[in-house]
Amino acid sequence: MPNTADDSIARLVERLKDDLAVARQYRLDNTTRLLEMAILDVQTVVHAISDDELRSFSEMIDRHRDGRGNVLPLRPKRAEGQR
């Protein structure tokens, strides 16, 4: 069975994730950031996320940070059994 573009891209993401783990292990901070950006770039293409959508999402996350920079839940957690 021939490889599809989706299969090739999925393998690319997995290789990048493996490389990311190595970069983190050796505390290669700049390389880690670059690999994270590469993974995000590929995933935005795969999922057809536009630059504007990604920018809007990033801005929304920034608006939901507490005073220490932690991201707050985007929607309140419900008690178990509630809908």
Image (cartoon, helix red, strand yellow):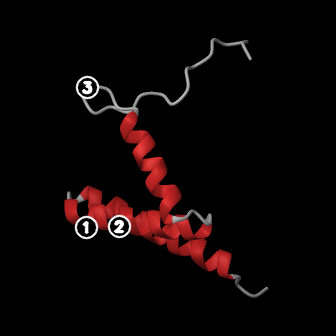
Residue to which mark 3 is pinned: 67
Q: Which mark is residue 68?
A: none
Neighbor class of circle 1 (other Cα within 10 Å; few <14, some 14-19, many 20+) is some
Neighbor class of circle 3 (other Cα within 10 Å; few <14, some 14-19, many 20+) is few
The amino acid type of the residue labelled 3 equals Gly
The x, y position of residue 51, in whole percent, is 48, 64
The amino acid type of the residue labelled 2 equals Leu
Numbered disc in front, either 1 or 3: 3
Do callouts 2 and 3 mark residues in contact (Cβ within 8 Å)?
Answer: no
Q: Which mark is residue 31?
A: 1
Q: Quadrant of the N terminus?
A: bottom right
Q: Quadrant of the C terminus?
A: top right
Q: Residue at x 72, y 13 (%)?
A: 82
The x, y position of residue 63, in whole percent, is 38, 35
61 or 8, nearer to the observer: 61
In which quadrant of the rendered view does residue 81 lie?
A: top right
The x, y position of residue 58, in whole percent, is 42, 49
Residue to which mark 2 is pinned: 35
Q: Is residue 56 left or right of residue 21?
A: right
Q: Is residue 41 left or right of residue 32?
A: right
Element at badge 1?
A: helix
